[in-house]
Image: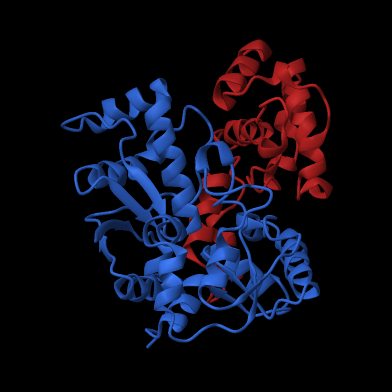
Chain colours: A red, B blue
Amino acid sequence: MTREEQKENLLRMSGTDVRKCMKCGKCSGRCPAYHEMDIKPHQFVSLLAQGKIEKLLSGKAIWSCLSCMACVERCPRGVAPAAVVEAVRDTVVRMQGANGIRAEDIPPIVDELIPQQLLVSAYRKYNK
Amino acid sequence: MKICYYPGCTLKTKAKDLDVYARLSAEALGVTMEEIENWQCCGAVYPMARDEIATKLSAVRALDYARHHGGKLLTLCSACHNVIKRTNEDMRSDKDISSRANNYLALEEPYRGETQVLHYLELLRDVVGFGELKKKVVKPLNKKVGAYYGCLLLRPSGVMAFDDPENPTIIEDFIRAIGGTPVVYPFRNECCGAYVSLKNAELPKKRSAAILESAKEKGAEEVITACPLCLYNLQVNGGGILPVRYFTELLAEALGVKE
């Protein structure tokens, strides 16, 4: 895929209009995972608008986003930064060998209390 | 009255308390929760990418079943509620997602978001009524309790339409109805760290401890939730700052039906 095609694909998957962003930074200000992210929520939006796809696809922040929708809730322009993060994460994990967690890493960290909801949601988010 | 009920995977295993006390309490309030047939796991997270169709089908199947069995679908787990309600909105308003899901499922009649999705707390507020609930309380709670909303019930508020996303009151009103004193604290609608605990437990540890410290500072003796993953993070990653229970357990205690 060309860079332009990748950009179109990410825009289509996210379903959000990144051109509406006015760079107020409220999304990043509200993000509970802000300090863990190499690419901040507002930067996901602007990098996609600029078509900087390589940078988006090589970032680590996709593994820290909590999908808590706080950024979506606070955006005064109706942009959904979380949907851009999800589009990038899905694009990455759909590639061969790019899953975020490996099945063999799970048993050592599973305790007696761990809810199925956690296993299912992590697999849905990090693996394809 | 009878209502279709979607329990979800975790309520059958690690979160039995959430389910069992809800059923006992509902019976005491004149509501029978009828578990729908052949339900499948909702997937626990709403797939946001607009080309994700297969991951939404289990929610659509449950919604379609409920359409033919009373028109309402009761949920209890916050994650199931979030996934099913958002998928329902897609089926109602997103032609692309709706037509692709319907093409695959080939139901007798296409599903277009007809079912009303109702969370158990909404049932208490809007169908039973907190006033009526208060009358049925035999053992008032007499405790200071912090409501923990988390994310899934409230956001995105445009679709969830559950309560004010920044200043919700439904769980505080619930606590008052069962004879407790609600404690309002700033972190009650902050994320607990969610599924990231499988990838990097440090983030949920920080988040969960901050939530419980915030509740304790405002005087809460315990915290209640409707979400098994929030309960897990707050209990295991929260450092034992405060006890955390499901809201249905307190409800069953107050109604005198806890066995």
Residue furthest left in the image:
B108
Q: Quadrant of the N terminus of chain B?
A: bottom left
> Looking at the image, is B211 positioned above or below residue B99?
below
Question: How many discs appear?
Answer: 0
* Residue at x-position 52% and y-position 64%: B226
* Residue at x-position 56% and y-position 59%: B170
Determine if residue A55 is in view: yes
Tell me if B206 is positioned left or right of B150 in this view. Answer: right
Tell me if B201 is positioned left or right of B118 in this view. Answer: right
Tell me if B236 is positioned left or right of A51 in this view. Answer: left
Q: Nearer the viewer, residue B166 or A50?
A: B166
Picture coordinates of residue B23, whole percent (x, y): 33, 71
Specify the quadrant of the image occupied by residue B242. Answer: bottom right
* Residue at x-position 37% and y-position 84%: B257
Determine if residue B18 is in view: no
> Looking at the image, is B95 positioned above or below residue B12?
above
> Looking at the image, is B242 positioned above or below residue B166?
below
Picture coordinates of residue B134, whole percent (x, y): 46, 73
Picture coordinates of residue B140, whole percent (x, y): 52, 83
Tell me if A64 is positioned left or right of B224 in this view. Answer: right
* Residue at x-position 47% and y-position 63%: A116
Specify the quadrant of the image occupied by residue B76. Answer: bottom left
Q: Quadrant of the C terminus of chain B?
A: bottom left
> Looking at the image, is A81 positioned above or below residue B42?
above
Q: Nearer the viewer, residue B107 or A63?
A: B107
Specify the quadrant of the image occupied by residue B157. Answer: top right
Q: Nearer the viewer, residue B45 or B22?
A: B22
Picture coordinates of residue A22, whole percent (x, y): 80, 21
